[in-house]
Structures are given as structure tokens and as C-alpha cells.
Image: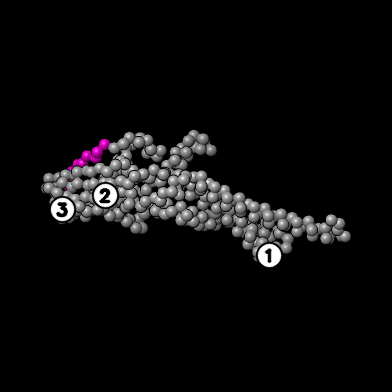
Amino acid sequence: MIFKNSSLMGNFFFNNLESKKSMKVKQLIFICINLVMTIFLMASPNLFSQQVLKPQEAFLIEAFIQNDVIQVNHRIENGYYLYKDKINYGSTQDGASLAGYTLPDGIQYKDEFFGNTEIYRAPFSVYINLNEGSILPTNLVVETQGCADIGLCYPPQTWIIDIQGGSNHEATLFSQGSNISEEVRLGSIITESNLLSVFFVFIGLGFLLAFTPCHLPTIPILSSIIIGQKESNRTKSFTLSLTYVLGMAVTYSAFGTLTALAGNQMQALFTMPGFIVF
């Protein structure tokens, strides 16, 4: 190609450079999206084939009182387990006093977070006696914590069972309302939602994270890039800003979701000497 003057040559190379920049941006976005999807597909096939149950569905508790003895029946769905040392019983009834109780032997289990412990995978029953002089309680409070085999752990749960009348009653999950921490709220979203919902939650958090104070020093750099562009317009400025925010949001959402879904395995990884030194 022959140019008649240097102005035409300059415009050609400038337009060609802008075209290459635009193609690089598109390629970067395409690579990021494919990388995220690849990570999710390789993370764990069980995440797509199995929907995580709610605590009320994974751990069923029933109780009744007869002859001053409270019988508590625990049922656990396949693929889930309860920690033995996280189970406690009590009552909010004034004047009710529960005596000691003995939990059945569990299965020895080496947990990445709690160490050597005992867990329950099969149904079991617990018998609780009342102290002498205690009135018959009208309710039973049960505290538990469990996990799913795919790597998700539930926050500690508190259950309340109405045990009046001598018949068998099912436990109701007690809602702590505003007392629940943000970590527990996010944990509930992860355990009670499907993978797609979890991804959009974290990508939303990634967008919010792009505007936190720790990222403010990068804003002047982005502004200088936008202002320094020749023949800059609103579309180009918006595209550059979107690329900046989207790249950060996708990255944080991918790693945040994978970390949450990894559960205790990720906690164990961070306790390795290499990560601590780093």
C-alpha cells in the first residue's frame, strides 16, 4: 500500500493501533469468561449433579417425653454428617432441669478444621432424664452443626421442639434474625442456593469491591488512561471503565465462590507453611 502523504499514513497506523487495542480488550474479556467457566466445570462434578439440602432437610430431629424421659431421634440424610461434640440439649422452660445424657459412639473422623473428632452419619437416639424436682418441660432446645460430603459446612444450628402432649414432634429451626453475622448469612446463601445463584452473589460482591477504598489509588490511573486517549468518546470511556470493573468482579467472584465451595479443604491449604510464609 502506497500513501500519498504522511497524514494519511499516520491516520492509518493510528486506526490500526486502536483496532488492535479493541481486539485485545475483547480477547481479554473472552479469556476471563472462559477461564471462569473452566474452573467451575473442573471444580467438582458433584456441585452440578447434587443440590445441597437445607438444614431442615439434611438433619431431621424429632422428640417426645414419656415417663419423665425425653427421647430425641436424629435422622441424617445420605452424604451428610453431624459433629458429636457440637450437639447440646437444653430447655427454655422455667423450672425445667435436664439431667446428664450420654451420646452414642460416633465414627472417628479426621476433620481438616476440627482435627480428630467423632461424627454421626446414621440415625441415632438420645435419652435425657430430668433432675429430681424438675417440672415437665414444654420444649427442648437442640444445638447441632453438620456438613455435606461435597465440602460445604453449615453454620451452627439451634432447633426448638415442642414436646407437650407425649406425642412425637419435629424440630423447628430457630431463626436468630439480626443476630446472625454476615459470615453466617453468606454461608446460608451458599448452602441453600444453587451454583448459579452463588456465582451471581459473588460477582455482585466483586462489583462492590471494585469501589472500596483500597482500590481508590487505581482510579487516577484509569482516569489518566481515559483522558490520555486521542479522539476519546463516551463509548470508549465506558468500555475501558467496564473492562476495569468487570475484570476485577469476575476474578473476585471466581476465587470467592471456589474458596467458599471448597470449605474446610481451603482452610487446611491456608495452614500449610508455604502459605503462612508467603
In this rendered view, identify the residue nearer to me: 267 or 37: 37
In this rendered view, identify the residue nearer to me: 214 or 267: 267
Q: Position of residue 117 (x, y in %)?
A: 33, 36
Say whether marks 2 and 3 touch (CB < 8 Å).
Answer: no
Residue 205 visible in the current orientation: no
Q: Residue furthest bottom?
A: 234
Tag 1: amino acid: Asn
**Marked residue nearer the N-terminal end (3 or 1):** 3
Q: Position of residue 82 (x, y in %)?
A: 32, 43
Tag 2: amino acid: Ile
In this rendered view, identify the residue nearer to me: 164 or 219: 164
| Helix, strand or loop under label 3 | helix
Display coloring: one colour
Q: Calculate the distance from the C-alpha at mark 2 to the C-alpha at mark 3.
A: 16 Å
Q: Position of residue 90 (x, y in %)?
A: 23, 48
| Helix, strand or loop under label 2 | strand
In the image: residue 51, left or right of residue 82: right
Q: Residues within 10 Å of mark 2 (few under 14, many from 20)?
A: many
Tag 3: amino acid: Gly
Q: Residue at x 60, y 59 (%)?
A: 242
Mark 2, residue position: 61
Q: Is residue 5 magenta?
A: no
Q: Calculate the distance from the C-alpha at mark 1 to the C-alpha at mark 2.
A: 63 Å
Mark 3, residue position: 166
Q: Choose mark 1 or mark 2, whichever is in front.
A: 2
Q: Is residue 99 magenta?
A: yes
Q: Quadrant of residue 185?
A: bottom left
Mark 1, residue position: 233
Q: Position of residue 222 (x, y in %)?
A: 64, 56
* Count of labels in the image: 3
Q: Which region of the structure is painted magenta?
A: 96-105
